[in-house]
Amino acid sequence: MKISRLVVQEIAHRFVNFVLAVIGVSIAVACLVASVTMIDAGEIQSQKLVAEGKTESERLVAKREKEVKDAGKQLNDEMRKITKGLGFNIVVLAEDEDIAAFHAEGTPTRTMPQEYVDRLAKSPIVVINHLLPIVTKKVEWAEEKQTIVLTGTRGEVPQAHRDPKKPLLDLVPKGKVVLGYRLHHPRKLKPGSKLTINGRELEVVKCHPERGSVDDVTAWVNLEEAQQMLDMENLVNAILALECNCATVDRIAEIRGEIAKVLPGTQILERGRKALARAEARNKAKKTAEASLKAARTSGEQMIASRQANADQMIASRKAQANVLVPLAVVGSFAWIVLLAVGNARQRRGEIGILRAIGMGSRDVLVLFLGKALLVGLAGGAIGYIVGYLVGTGYSGPIDQSLFDLNWLLTALLMAPALSAAATWLPALVAAGQDPAVVLQEQ
Amino acid sequence: MLISLDHITKTYTGDAGPIVAVDDVSVSVEAGEFVAVVGPSGCGKTTLLLVAGGLLRPENGEVSIDGTDPYSLSGEQRARFRAEQIGFVFQQFHLVPYLNILDNVMAPALVTGETSARERAGILVERFGLADRLGHRPGQLSTGERQRVALARALLNEPRVILADEPTGNLDGDNSEQVLQALKTFADEGGAVLLVTHDPDAVAFAGRQVVLQGGQLASSES
């Protein structure tokens, strides 16, 4: 017979004592495993929440980015359209143009080759855009006996190094005319009406509302037709342009310098600062869009940070609970096993006395008790792990991945027998050390 | 000389002061001898038996079991010495309640670890008429059967000495005779038996009796 058989037989004989001890160990292990499982679950859930928050935030930011981009684009386009009426603010005039006369008359009187505008368009110049060649002249509208400004335009000339932009002014087709307010209103002309200007029959395509400027007495026709009507073929007397949103302080000097390289001798005028307002408005729109986007990003980051903080708080709370619960459970379990072991040793006093009398050494008695303690620990560790795992996963709610951790199972199966053996050690030592003669005499 | 107790003195310390349980007692038992120790209750019979069994160290005197002083050995060595050299039989049987009969008989083999123990246990339970009770637990046996189990356990390791403390105290006539006969047979086969008893019938089985009175040796007669 071996001591192991004695251990097993004793467990079977005093099964309630064994079960009570196993329950004690199970509770301690279950508390530990449940706490660890809940903390692990919390961390996984936290990571998931934060990841979801990031995805959601990124989605929102992307959505907002698109909205802002679309809105910005729309705003930009609208601003462009709104501000087109403000007119071009750069005028390229012929070398011999009398600027004083130009200011006095409101229209240029000298000409330059139409080829200039093409040269300008093909150049890599970046300080201006929206090139619009015109030929314009005050003439007497013979049929109506009225002085008008006849302006020919062919629409914007695309710059070779830029992406084509939507023209600010549409081309006036041949045979058509666009009329200022003072020309169409008194005569009740409408789009589709026919009229004759200095012998050339034209059809009205558009009637401008009153602008309170020279535009009100201007008739816009196709550039080529205007050149013919004014006897200025292949000539223009101004190239209108819009200055870019240059960062330079002395913008006009920079523009003059650039254009002089392409069209030496021409004169450059900056007409008013209206276009600057337009650029500023565009910048403002851009800044507003950027601020909105930044706010969306900040909001997303705050949402992620908030989720992370909540998750951290939840984990910290679980850890705090575990820090109290687990030591309490371990100490309680330890005390419980000590009590059971003391009771068991007392119960077995006579048995141990006779076994010692017939030759069993104190070490064998220790083995007898500690062997049982190890079995209690193993059973308690296994049951405690299962219970703790179930409680932990149940309490944590649904989770995508398994929380099973082999290391914690092994820890439970090693720690529980160690706890049980440690708790049994002293009672076992007392039992092993008892004097068999005393026991036998007592009985 | 298998058992030699030479000028043994053993004192207990109680609330009322020291009590001399055994006072300068010398007893020896030869191989093949069956000696009964008799005397009134409290005369020190059981104390003398425990001293002889290496379980209770005396203040004075020398103990020798088959030439070895058990008290000169370490605790673990003395336990093993008891398992190999001495068989104990008690009035209360002291069987392990959760082991069946066979395991109780084989309990001393826990220490020696002999592989032939099961075979010897089988022979002993057969000899004591317990073959049909092997799977039973002590609680399921009669008192006579329990004492026979205790006797079989005492004989398992083939000791040189048997120390018996009132082994017939709880038994009826037939069972007592059976137990005493077994002890006599053991002695006849070359062992030494030291029997503590009140039972006159038991004394009749002994070849010699030692009378204790107040812890002292009153007489020793064949």
Image: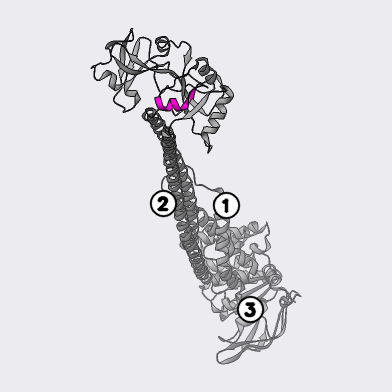
Residue B120 appears in view = yes
| Front tag of 3 and 1 | 1
Q: Do labels 2 and 1 share a chain?
A: yes
Look at the numbered discs 2 and 3 and tell me whether their residues touch, using CB distance below 8 Å. no
Q: Mark 1 points at which residue?
A: A410
| Mark nearer the N terminus (2 vs 1) | 2
Label 3 marks a residue whose chain is B
Residue A105 within the segment the image draws in magenta: yes
Give the magenta part as a residue range: A92-109
Residue A371 within the segment the image draws in magenta: no
Q: In the displayed structure, does residue A369 sit left or right of residue A39?
A: right
The part of the image, by quadrant, that contains residue A436 is bottom right
Q: Are marks 3 and 1 on the same chain?
A: no
Q: How crowded is mark 3: few (under 14 residues within 10 Å), some or many (20 or more)?
A: many
Label 2 marks a residue whose chain is A
Residue A395 — which label?
2
Dot 3 falls on a residue whose secondary structure is helix
Disc 2 versus disc 1: distance between alpha carbons?
23 Å
Residue B93 appears in view = no
Amino acid carrying mark 3 in the image: Leu
Horizontal and vertical percent position of residue A94: 50, 21
Horizontal and vertical percent position of residue A90: 47, 28
Residue B50 — which label?
3
Dot 2 falls on a residue whose secondary structure is helix
Amino acid carrying mark 1 in the image: Leu
- Image quadrant occupied by the N terminus of chain A: bottom right
Label 1 marks a residue whose chain is A
Amino acid carrying mark 2 in the image: Tyr
Dot 1 falls on a residue whose secondary structure is helix
Query: At 46% across and 10% down in the image, what residue appears?
Result: A233
Horizontal and vertical percent position of residue A424: 56, 67
